[in-house]
Image (tube, rainbow, N blue to C red):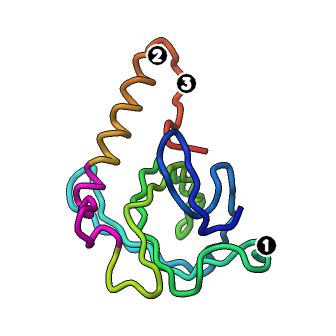
Amino acid sequence: MAYDDLKEFNGAKYSGMPIGGAHNWLYPNGLWREKKVAPDEWVFEFECTKGRRNAAPTNSGAKQGTGFNWFIVADQKAVKANTDQYQTIMHGSKFKVGHKRPYWRGWSYEYPEQLSYRQRVIQILQQALERLEKEEMANQNQKELTYPFSL
């Protein structure tokens, strides 16, 4: 089945990588900028060019110029190793908010009859909260921390 072929999962139609596909990405020279905005809150930006750990199969994946807009929900743990370094581990999920094909004027959420960017993010957060609440009810006696958004 080709990347752009129409697929179905739990009644939802989609195109792209089949469910169960996986990537390993390298993020060399990434720049993480953060600013403290409240006692327990920081805002951040992360910028880099990511590359595949292994070469892509010939004629696979999205066409050059395709864009993806992801919303990321994650849990990050950082342990100070020395004055200038932290060992960082992050577990999470990323959700597709929208996409842009190379020949489109705008992002998918900018077109009529599509959820807006904010509506899609609200939907993602509501579904994530429902999932967490269901797992919390099922695991109330479990003392070990689980990562509901991890792989």
* Residue 112 occupies quadrant: bottom left
Range shown magenta = 108-122
Which residue does the numbered mark 3 point to in the structure image? 144
* Residue 34 occupies quadrant: bottom left
Residue 109 in percent (x, y) is at: 30, 67
Location of the C terminus by quadrant is top right
- Density class for disc 1 (Cα within 10 Å; few <14, some 14-19, many ≥20) is few
Residue at image x 78%, y 77%?
55
- 121 or 148, which is in the foreground? 121
Is 112 one of the magenta-colored residues? yes
Secondary element at tag 1? loop
Residue at image x 69%, y 67%?
2
What amino acid does circle 2 point to?
Answer: Ala
Secondary element at tag 3? loop
Q: Which mark is residue 138?
A: 2
What amino acid does circle 1 point to?
Answer: Asn
What amino acid does circle 3 point to?
Answer: Glu
Residue 119 in percent (x, y) is at: 23, 55
Q: Is residue 70 above or below residue 65?
A: above
**Which comes sooner in the sequence, label 3 or label 2?**
2
- 130 or 150, which is in the foreground? 130
**Which comes sooner in the sequence, label 1 or label 3?**
1
- 70 or 79, which is in the foreground? 70
Residue 140 in percent (x, y) is at: 44, 15
Secondary element at tag 2? helix
Q: Which mark is residue 54?
A: 1
